[in-house]
Image (cartoon, rainbow, N blue to C red):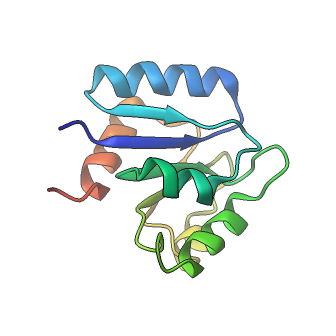
Amino acid sequence: MEKKVLLAEDDITMVSLLKTLLKMEGYEVVALDADADVPAAVRREKPDILLLDVHLFQQSGLEILDELRRASDISSTRVVMTSGMNMREECINRGANDFLLKPYMPDDLIGILKRNIKRT
């Protein structure tokens, strides 16, 4: 069974590249609009992992992360935060499972996904 990755990223080119890469690696990929209701999408899609940009157009990835962690029904969702600024410590302290500094290599992303997706 394919593992599902939910993408919350505002860079359209990055979304396209990630979708292609992750599908080639055997993942099911659902990309959200940059202004989407991410917690609602997590409830609807039930992803194995959420790849969440710290800075979305109209939203803060950190605030979305806080909301996910407060919601009892989706608080255990695995979240990997990404940013062009090194915000690893802040993201981890706020509840992210991992952090990727942009730009990152495809192998780094795949390694983090494999480490963080729960085996079923």
Q: Is residue 54 left or right of residue 43?
A: right
Quadrant in which the C terminus appears: bottom left
Question: Who's the residue at 26% across and 55% down the image?
Answer: 115
Question: Is residue 100 shown to the viewer in this render?
Answer: no
Question: Who's the residue at 25% across and 47% down the image?
Answer: 114
Residue placed furthest toward the left: 120
Tally the numbered discs.
0
Rendered image quadrant of residue 87: bottom right
Q: Is residue 117 left or right of residue 1?
A: right
Rendered location of residue 84, percent (x, y): 67, 45
Question: Who's the residue at 23% across and 59% down the image?
Answer: 118
Q: Residue 3, relative to residue 31: is it above or below?
A: below
Rendered location of residue 11, percent (x, y): 70, 30
Q: Residue 5, relative to residue 116: is it above or below?
A: above
Question: Is residue 30 shown to the viewer in this render?
Answer: yes
Q: Is residue 29 left or right of residue 84?
A: left
Rendered image quadrant of residue 70: bottom right
Quadrant in which the N terminus appears: top left
Q: Nearer the viewer, residue 84 or 57?
A: 57
Question: Who's the residue at 23% across and 36% down the image?
Answer: 2
Residue placed furthest toward the front: 44
Rendered image quadrant of residue 4: top left
Q: Nearer the viewer, residue 87 or 38?
A: 38
Rendered location of residue 9, percent (x, y): 64, 39
Rendered location of residue 98, percent (x, y): 44, 61
